[in-house]
Image (cartoon, helix red, strand yellow):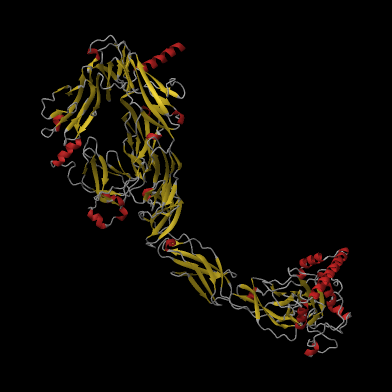
Amino acid sequence: MERRRMEAALLVLFLGHLVTALEVPLDLPQPPTITHQSPKDYIIDPRENIIIHCEAKGKPHPSFSWTRNGTHFDVDNDPNVSMKAHSGTLVVDISREKVENYEGVYQCTARNKHGTAVSNNIVVRQSIAFSALRALLEGSPLWSKEKIKPIVVQEGVSLVLPCRPPAGLPPPIIFWMDNNFQRLPQSRRVSQSLNGDLYFSNVRREDSRSDYICYARFPHTQTIQQKQPINVRVLNLDAINDTMADFYNDTDLFSEAPVDERRPTFLIPSGSSSSKMVLRGHVLEMECIAEGLPTPEISWTKVSGDLPARRTSFLHYNKTLRIVNVSESDAGDYRCTAKNQLGAVHHTIHVSVKAAPYWISGPPRNLVLAPRENGVLTCRASGTPKPSITWSMNGIPIENSPKDVSRKVEDDTIIFTEVQTGSSAVYQCNISNDYGYLLSNAFVNVLSEPPRVLTPANKVYQVIKNHQALIDCASFGSPIPKITWFKGSRSISLDGDPYITHDNGTLEIHVAQAQNSGKYTCVARNSLGIYENHVHLEVKEPTRILKQPEYKVVQRGRSVVFECKVKHDPSLIPTMTWLKDDGELPDDERLIVDSDSLTITEVTENDAGVYTCIMNTTLDHDSASAELTVVERPDPPTDLELTDQKKRSVQLTWTPGDEHNSLIQKFLIQYEDSLHHRGHWHNLTEVPGTRTTAHLKLSPYVHYTFRVLALNAMGFSRPSFPSRMYKTDPAAPDENPTGVEGFGTEHNNLVISWKPLSGFQANGPGLHYKVMWRQKALDSEWTTVTVANNSKFVVLGTPTFVPYELKVQAVNNHGDGPEPKIAEGYSGEDLPIAAPENVQAIIVNSTLAEVHWDPVPLHLIRGHLKGYKVYYWRKHSLHKHNPDHMEKDILTFSGNHTRGMLPGLHPFSLYSFNVRVYNGKGEGPPSPTQQFKMPEGVPGPPSSLLVSNPNLDSLTLEWGPPHDRNGHITGYTLKYQPVNNSNELGPVEEVALAANETSITLPTLKYSTRYKFYLNAKTVTGPGPAITQEVVPIMDEAVASRQVDIATQGWFIGLMCAIALLILILLIICFIQRNKGGKYPVKEKEDAHTDPEFQPMKDDDCTFVEYSDNEDHKPLKGSRTPSNGTVKRDDSDDSLVDYGEGGDGQFNEDGSFIGQYSGKSASRDTAEGHESSEAPSPINAMNSLNSFV
């Protein structure tokens, strides 16, 4: 079994070698070969001469003859017919004859001494369109000129406008236009059928027009003919008036009932099924057009399989199914479905596919055989039904030809065995069935010829690296020569990877590399000789696009740039080309082409498409494409239809417009109420962009007109054309007024107000309101009045601020609205007649007090409680010399509060206050005025701090008491510390001062050293903020002058150096002693910087850190209470005795008792409280500063 398979494979290879076609050089003997002929179906133009082509080659050159309708056509005897020289082409002069005399079936014969070839049967006929054109030129119109009566139809019915164009060969192209040569718009509802008729699934009033014109364009003659215009009138029964009725003579049309919605039915094709035959390779077109209301949608399926996706398209809004290049697999049943909201209908089309004969492996090939060689002619074809095959030799049926023992015919094959010289001939294979035929010529040429190479010598082949290289060695010889290839020195033949030698002699290098460049030699040899030829191969670098253009989305009016950067072989000349949608760029100055880019300025919608840059060289090219999407607002929707019409709802359907490359996000539906608000459009609802229908809820007594807007990322489209008007019947109101309120403008009235209904909400004519009220507490009967054209009513004579129940009901001529909800309101307010009681103040701290009161009973408020107001004012400070302050402050506490805080009060002050209740009318009487005293607080900073009498080692500080004492001043605290040139602070010294002191002299300060002073006052509450000052002690001028004079002497300089050395030794000893006690200057500096009590004044707010006594209150090291006259009491201090209140003791300026001043007195301890019993000594403080330096 395996051996038989191998034998079969070898036979196929052998026969394949034998049937390889050879191009016989024209200098060698050969039978004729038809090279050009007219098509089988030859449609001619009677206005021009008839030219029937027949060209052939052969050696010797063939002679030609013709047959017409199966008999010999004597060209020489017909003066109107001539044959071109060295050709069989006929030229018929029809200027003196009618073209009909030369219609018929023509066949050309080309013959020489080696054989005879024949052409196809050429059917010559003139187009039907030419006959029609001739009739038109002679005054006979293609279409009848009779007047077509107007077509009057009722809105909603279906309609067919017939075209019935004259026949044509080929058939004419049909289209409908108006008088202005504008194509009539077509849609899912209106479309043209394949036969040219115009179908309306349902008509609308906008379909009314008088210029429906069918045009027929005949492509062969390039002529257009038109039918008489058709006048169509679409009438809506609701809109017909008496004038129109008289015009149409009261036809039966007006007595018909309005057209209802209906399920689809097919206009074409008829019935539930039909059949269609199509030929293989042709185009299959099937159509289904349905009528119905609303407009049906058409869909297609294949019952017995799937539709061929790549060959299928849907035309005319899915009404036409088109399949190109039909094959046998397309046979079967196809179903079209028409569907709307009311139902669906189906139609099945059975498609059968027939096939004219077609080649399976191509037509038979010419054979060139050497004497005693074998060969095969194969004529293999197929068709449906199966075609028949006949053979001829030199134009004569083979069964009538001379017998040849070397020839054997087996169905579609002729086998030649050991052919002999002189047996050359042309064989014809004819395959035919009911749908066509195939005719092919193939010669058998018996030759003895040594080899020759037909490829030009020294030909240079150029290929791109990594591409396939094919180097030709076209040869001829009989027997067929064997080809051998060599490279360079011809040491060894090229056989094996990477080289492949094909049967026709071509050398293939599958992936060419640079090392494959060079000189190649092909050698052709057969039994009669040998021939060699030299060629050259050059391998080039490929062309590559390095930077490709990118996808762009751009708004209309802007600019866009596509880049295209390329690399190529330097020996090749590149050419850059840009294409748009695979075609040439438009000739537009906005498109600017540079060496590596394309710029489009002021982009329009027509610029959208795919742009391709192509870099071409003589050998290769590279290309890259990018799409340009131009976005803009969508087109408005079209074809608005109203269906499913009910009293309170309707279904709106539309067709979306072009979204312009930006998806539609939503549709906005608007309405106009021409009854109540003509000319104004209102938003009704929105639906997603994927929907094209909306169920609209309607109100009674409205004349609706709808329109639809589409929204994409660029914005809203223009509104669609309005729909037809839809009127709803009147009805009783569906709702009552909202916002019902009751209030009084006077103490004895009640104003009832509401938000009136709009005309849209009225639901009918005669809108008015029933206004009802009663006192809530009494549960009395309702009082009712009727109010029209107003939105409020005033009830007079009501008691003051009494609750009422209110109702407002809408009423029109068709009934009452629903039962209204009860609202509550109050009659007018009056001023409160009572003040809050049990008013008292509680002190929280020195600046905050809390006021309490009892609420006023509601019936005494006589209105809506708004809140309470606290009036308060500072009478005066508790210092006698401070004047009274009568400015009143007001704090308002809304709602039903019974207490409130009074912030920001002045310490040590006397305040008065009262409380009042208030309503919407105003305030009630005040409560009795009461007073409260604020306790002491911390004082403000001293009013001033001045330096006087500065000397070499001392100075005097003077200050003024605080402006804001906020209590009795109990004393002052002075702190000071040195500051070196690096702004580092030294140890702090502190001095406690009495309340009546206003100056102090500090001795033993180090001269030329800057000091920082901090001074603050204190009360029993605590110390206040400090005032600061910086100063440097200086010498008087005399001393300074003497010092300058001495300093110029040499002995003084030496003395100073000795003193400096001595001081340095003393400082080292002091440093050692201090380290033994755990203290050292750096530590003191750190303490001084980290202690918040001694931080300097802030520059931005000029405030000082308040002195804190949270640290241990131990006296500074070496401090003591002053006992000399350095610190003196100011004689100008005030006391209570000075203001006439008398007393045995002495008081300072803030009223505190100071007693007899002494170094350590009990009165001092009492006044100081928890402060240190000893004040720091300025002398000791200065000693401490020496250690810092």
Q: Decide: is 1057 above or below 651.
A: below
In the picture, the quarter occupied by the C terminus is bottom right
- Residue 874 image position (x, y, % from top left): 69, 81
Q: Is residue 992 left or right of residue 479?
A: right
Q: Decide: is 262 above or below 1110.
A: above
Q: Quadrant of residue 622?
A: top left
Q: Is residue 472 visible?
A: no
- Residue 517 image position (x, y, % from top left): 43, 29
Q: Decide: is 1019 above or below 194.
A: below
Q: Quadrant of residue 73?
A: top left
Q: Is residue 793 visible?
A: yes
- Residue 275 image position (x, y, % from top left): 32, 31
Instruction: Name the one closer to the observer, 452 or 839.
Output: 452
- Residue 557 image position (x, y, % from top left): 39, 54
Instruction: Name the one closer to the observer, 393 or 142.
Output: 393
Q: Is residue 1173 left or right of residue 421?
A: right
Q: Quadrant of residue 17?
A: top left
Instruction: Name the one closer to the observer, 1065 or 328.
Output: 1065
Q: Residue furthest front?
A: 1050
Q: Decide: is 1 above or below 536.
A: above
Total tally of numbered discs in the picture: 0
- Residue at 73% across / 86% down in the picture? 881
Q: Residue furthest top?
A: 405
